[in-house]
Image (cartoon, rainbow, N blue to C red):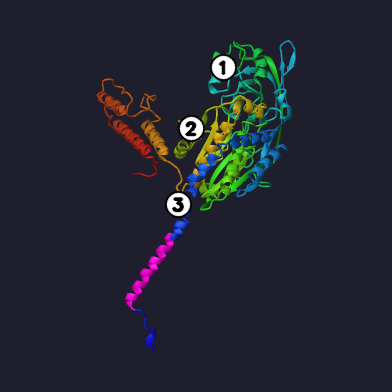
Amino acid sequence: MPSPSSQNPTKPSLFILLILLSFLFYYYHTLHTNLHPSSPRNPQNTPDHYRNLFLHHSLSSISASTISAHLRRLTLHPHLAGTPSASPTAQYVLRHLDLPGIETLVKPYQPLLSYPAHASLALHLPNGTVRSLPLSEHPTAGAVFPAYHAYSPSGDAFAEAVYVNQGREEDYERLEELGVRIRGRVVVMRRGGGPRGRVVEAAAERGAEAVVMFTEAGVERGTVMMGLGDPLTPGWAAGVGDERLRLEDEEVKERFPRIPSMPVSVDTAEVILRELRGPEVPEEWWGPQLRIRGGRVGSGPVILNFTYREDRKMATIQNVFGVIRGQEEPDRYVILGNHRDAWTYGAVDPNSGTAVLLEIARRLGVLMHSGWRPRRTIVLCSWDAEEFGMIGSTEWVEENLASLGSNAVAYLNVDCAVQGPGFFASATPQLDSLLVDVTKKVEEIERLGRADSDFSAFLHHAGIPSIDLYYGEAFPVYHTAFDSYEWMKVHGDPLFRRHVAVADIWGLVALHLADDPVLPFNHLSYVAQLLNDRLMLGERGLLDAEGLKGRSWFKHLVYSPAKDYQSKLSFFPGIADEIYRAAKTAGGQSSIQHEIWRVARAIRRAAMVLRGELIWREN
């Protein structure tokens, strides 16, 4: 039995005690909150604060001078993928990504690459004179690889020359009208009719022996491989020692044109074109830089002696990465990418973008020093072997497809950061609003329907929302030995202000995607585009491939004119036609019913298109 002095407290005393404890808890909680506010309420720790800090570092001359210094260093020597000169450039990027808070790594692959072993081109005139034609840009090209088309097969041709303009379907049709033969000829082609590999293969389909391709500036190198990624490992990564297809496999052979090709300068092309005879060249076929007019398309009588030998081999390439781990969603990736390899010095393509990527890394390092950590993981990528066919990025996407498909937020690409004046952006629609908010000056955002840079594997293979940013459009030193730091300093961006602007835009888009609690995706652009597509395609659903009976040219089953011009039925012409026939002949009821069913099926097709559905079951 308890003693009288140890009695339990009464209910009123318990109530008073609870009130006192509640008051004390409230007092100390309020005091602690005032003295130590939580980070979301601290304006120094908000995403907006860090975005402003990121921009603040572009206002001084440090950003421009840093980018200029990077570009100068990156372009001291040519750095073609898979060659010894490529490794120092990779190490330079690796060193400048290796900042506190940024994890760095190098991922090698071993794809099939293509280099020139020997090339020659000579002009044989009817009088017996033989003239050897130059294939490089003298004197600048001393340190660079000879101009060539990667993956062009080895081959020889000794045949009459014929000018085919840009090698498009309509160009060959025009030559056919002029009575000019392509079979057995060496075609001289002006660049611009489509991807190099496609136009070379189109010439092969018409019986050409070889292709000589010129541009209206320097000698434009490039790949003629069709498709993306390593040709020996389609769909899987080109890891060292991994499975590979054989060169003689059809799947590999169809990636390359069947005839050889080589690039030449406009000066070399003019030497050939001046000697051609035959029908006159259509006026619209002369490019703006060609100095001759009123020439002939050939063929002949001059003969081109064409020789090319390819050195095709396995080579090691290196993708370089810098990773900033996200604090709250570390398994969500915002990926920024630029390729590092170049045909020659690469001041515009691609190292203007590489220099900007390194500047973004520097600024993010400053943010981390100030206490910032991204909500989601940011991955900075420096791709290799893009020029051969987006190989570095494609191999990495193929190797990480499952993870990227479920975890990648977006891919932000910059290839040539600055080519000239005027800002341009291409994007998938859900990123339109973010781009407009960041830039405040993008009037029209193009769609990424092309496949000419490292966004290709991310968007077209993995379905990841993507952006491509750049200043300027076509530039005259593209893929030539004149794409140098000096060209950029004099012509491209002398003060490097456009480079700084690309760093601002690229970095801000990345920070929004990495830090905003709710991803800044706006699918209204998609909705509007898809709705317009459906409204447009709904009309196509009312077409019938067979057309109207007896008038197959008319495909529309609702609005085509009726055969009976006196018909009072202003729509459903097939039904009107059968009613007209039935009135003149007996037993036409089944034909009328058939036309009614055709119209019913067409209306159903149109309805399904407007709803965006597939016809997969009977209603």
Measured in 3D between alpha carbons, the distance from the residue under mark 3 to the one under mark 1, in whole angstroms, is 65 Å
Residue 578 is one of the magenta-drawn residues: no
Q: What is the spatial separation of the Cα atoms under label 2 and label 3, in whole angstroms?
A: 39 Å
Q: Are marks 2 and 3 in contact (CB under 8 Å)?
A: no
Amino acid type, label 2: Glu
Q: Are marks 3 and 1 in contact (CB under 8 Å)?
A: no
Is 606 in front, or is 285?
Answer: 285
The numbered mark at residue 41 is 3
Secondary structure under badge 1? helix
Residue 173 in the image: state x and y as whole percent. 54, 19
Identify residue type, mark 1: Trp
Q: Is residue 596 visible?
A: yes
Residue with the mark numbered 1 = 285
Instruction: From the image, give the main secondary structure of the stretch colored magenta.
Output: helix
Q: Is residue 178 above or below residue 316?
A: above
x and y percentages locating residue 319 in the rendered image = 64, 43
Point 41% across, 35% down: residue: 529
Q: Position of residue 129 (x, y in %)?
A: 75, 13
Assign the N terminus to one quadrant of the image: bottom left
Circle 2 residue: 446
**Which mark is nearer the camera, 1 or 2?**
2
Foreground: disc 3 or disc 1: 3
Nearer to the camera, 116 or 618: 116
The tag earlier along the polypeptide, 2 or 3, is 3
Q: For marks 2 and 3, give the one nearer the viewer.
A: 3
Percent x, y of residue 184: 65, 21
Number of residues whose C-alpha sits closer than 10 Å to that of mark 3, classed few (under 14), some (14–19) or many (20 or more): few
Q: Residue at x 39, y 25 (%)?
A: 552
Span shown in magenta: 10-30
What secondary structure is found at the residue carrying circle 2? loop
Q: Does residue 307 appear in the picture of this structure? A: no
Residue at 28%, 29% in the rendered image: 588
